[in-house]
Structures are given as structure tokens and as C-alpha cells.
Image (cartoon, rainbow, N blue to C red):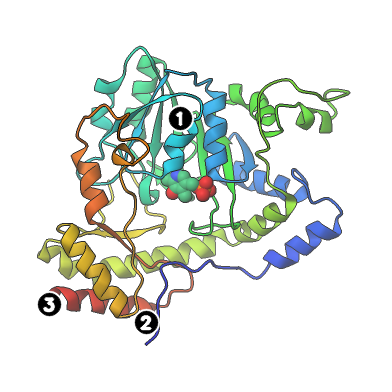
Amino acid sequence: MKLIPFNKPYMTGQETKYIQEAVASGKISGDGNFTKKCHQFFEQKYGIKKALLTTSCTDALEMCAILLNILPGDEVIMPSYTFVSTSNAFVLRGAKIVFVDSSQEHPNLDVNQIESLITPKTKAIVVVHYAGVACDMDVVMALAEKYNLKVVEDAAQAIDSFYKGRPLGTIGHLAAFSFHETKNIISGEGGLLAINDLQFAARAEIIREKGTNRTAFFRGEVDKYGWVDIGSSFLPSEIIAAFLFAQLENLDQIQQRRKAIWARYHQKLQPLALKGIQLPALPSYATNNGHIYFMLCKNLEQRSELLAYLKEKGVYAVFHYLSLHSSPYFHQVHDGRPLTQSDEFTNTLLRLPLFYELTDQEVDYITDTLLQFFEE
Ligand SMILES: *Cc1c(COP(=O)(O)O)cnc(C)c1O
């Protein structure tokens, strides 16, 4: 029996060639030619005002927390159904995390519940575009304007996806992307800080370079560099940037294939909608970037049985987040509000294999297996 993994990192073929070029150039630390090419790519293709590569999305989120001057006791509103880094980056600065429930239709936060959670201590709203599907950003940005808050987009999964025609990661004041090997565009580990409000640009360069003004020094703007602020080592080496650039050059082709796989799943699985299984619904303001194909089982028991059945047939499907408000680290701190939709996604969401090299025949095998399970 052929085994179908959940994910398989895709290489375009140019990665090692570009890494060799970087090595041959004699400059392999950060902010060399390949880093510049990656920055230009994001600024030109998506209109990000200033792009800065980081070593991970986690690091880009930590930079956001520093840039927003998050201090102990400041409140930050975000969904509970997300990856730990969304929250941890702000906890590191002493923030109090105020979790919002997911909406009924989608793991994304319910924008209608944000306003009642805003207090005089609220400093920021962090949205997560789960599966690359946009949150309703007009609502979020209007609240930010009304209460003078900053908005961070956790766009880890959201590359090449859009909200009312605008690229995700260009709408909030700041945004963070991931190039972890499980994402659409990869560099092993890697990330990007997108700065859309340029008041943050100069300080972001400093924070990313260990709290020094080395970046301005390399541009010849100051005659020596030194310690001017807090920071850390958030910039990746040229080896990472070289790998990433090879991926970016093939972004359209990668996206096209991933979206075709997503569409094939969606078409073949329509019969399940009649059997109480919820397939992903896209709001009219959002596009799909083929990051995740998920379905919602009736309950935890059904999902566990289905995962086991698929595994028996050689298909590695997986569940996803365990709500952060009930995590071992956070549950004592959480204010006790029930977040029932978030728990619902924790228990019922199942992700199917989705990677560039997944063939149509494999997709058909997976969907046939799923349909069989629900026949039995
Ligand atoms: C993958 C992911 C992250 C973390 O990205 P890294 O690059 O691994 O740090 C953060 N948030 C979300 C929503 C993610 O999916």
C-alpha cells in the first residue's frame, strides 16, 4: 500500500544553486543580495511598504510586540484557535491576552465579539487568517481607528491571499508571514515582518539587528554603529534567503497547483455535505490560497475514528490547534469565558494532505476513501 504523507516540502530545483551562489559570493550573513531580492519581491508584488526577512514568523510576531511597546498589563485581543506563537510573542512582553471566540462558520475570530472586549488597557488586536482565509478586516480596522489600537495580522498561512482584492498582510499596521516547511512557500524555517505603517520602519531595522543601528550604518547614513534600543538577532542568513528566493520565483506555479488540489477535494467531497460534514466555506470578501483543506466532523469521536480509518488506508490526515485558552500554560490565567466555537474546531477540524506533488490520483484515492468511510 502506498502511504500518503500529510505534507511534503516542495523544492523548485533552484534552491541549492542559489545557495551555492550565496556561498560563492563570500557573504553569507544576513541582508545580502538574496535578502534584498526577497524584500523587493514582497514590496513589488504585494505592495507591502517595507518587508524585512526574519528567521521565523514567531520572530516577526515578537518584533511586532516590541514595536508596539507592549508593556506588562497591556491587553491584546486575539483568537484562541491559533498557533502558540501568536500569543506567546505578546506574553513575552508581559501582555494580558484576551481571547476572542472563533466565528460559527470559520476558525477565524468572530469580529462581532471584539468590541465588547476592548478596555482602556487594550493596545492591539491580532488577527489570524486561518487557512489563508481573510478575517473581515474592514470591521477590525474600523474598531482600531475608533479606539486608537494597532492591528497585527498573523499572516503565517496567508501568502498570496486577498481581502476585497487587497493582499493579506498589507492591511494591518504590521503583519507576520511564515516560511516554515509546512507553509505554501518555504525556507525550512523563516519568516517576514511586513510593515505597512512606516512610522515603525526605522525602529524595526534596529530591533532586528540586536538593538543596533547597523542597517543604517551599512547604508552609509551614520558613520559608526552602536547600541541604541532593545532588540535581538532576528535576521536570517543569506543561505536561507537564497533558498526562499528560489521559491518566490515559482510562487505563481506553486499557488496554481495547490489551489487546483484544493478545488479537486472540494468538488469530490460535496456528497459529504449531505451527511452532516461541513466543508470549508469562503466568505464573499475572501479568496482561497490553497494552504489548508479542512473539514469539520460531527464530533471528536467521529474525527478520531476517521483519522484512524484514513491511517489504516495509508492516508495521514491530521487535526490542528488545541485552543490556547485551555492549554496547560494558559488555562489558569484565562478569565473563564467559555469559547465554545474555538473548542468545537479543536475537536472536529480535520486537515487532509495538501502539498505541491500530491497527484490527482492520490486526491481521488483520498476522497474515495473518505466517501467509503461515510458509506459504512
Ligand atoms: C506556522 C504559524 C506560525 C509560526 O510560524 P513559524 O515560522 O514556524 O514561527 C504562527 N502563526 C500561525 C497562524 C502559523 O500557522
Badge 1 density bin: few <14, some 14–19, many ≥20, Cα 10 Å: many
Residue appearing at x 40%, y 66% in the figure: 354
Residue at numbered disc 1: 91
Residue at numbered disc 3: 375
Determine contact: label 1, label 2, CB under 8 Å: no
Residue 279 vertical placement versus 89 (above, below): below
Find residue 325 and name its label. none
Q: Amino acid at mark 2?
A: Gln
Q: Amino acid at mark 3?
A: Glu
31 with respect to 267 (left or right): right
Badge 3 density bin: few <14, some 14–19, many ≥20, Cα 10 Å: few
Badge 2 density bin: few <14, some 14–19, many ≥20, Cα 10 Å: few
Q: CA distance from mark 3 to mark 1?
A: 47 Å
The spot of residue 151 in percent (x, y) is 44, 28
Q: Nearer the viewer, residue 283 or 229?
A: 229
Q: Amino acid at mark 1?
A: Val
Q: CA distance from mark 1 to mark 2?
A: 45 Å
Q: CA distance from mark 3 to mark 2?
A: 21 Å
Residue at numbered disc 2: 361
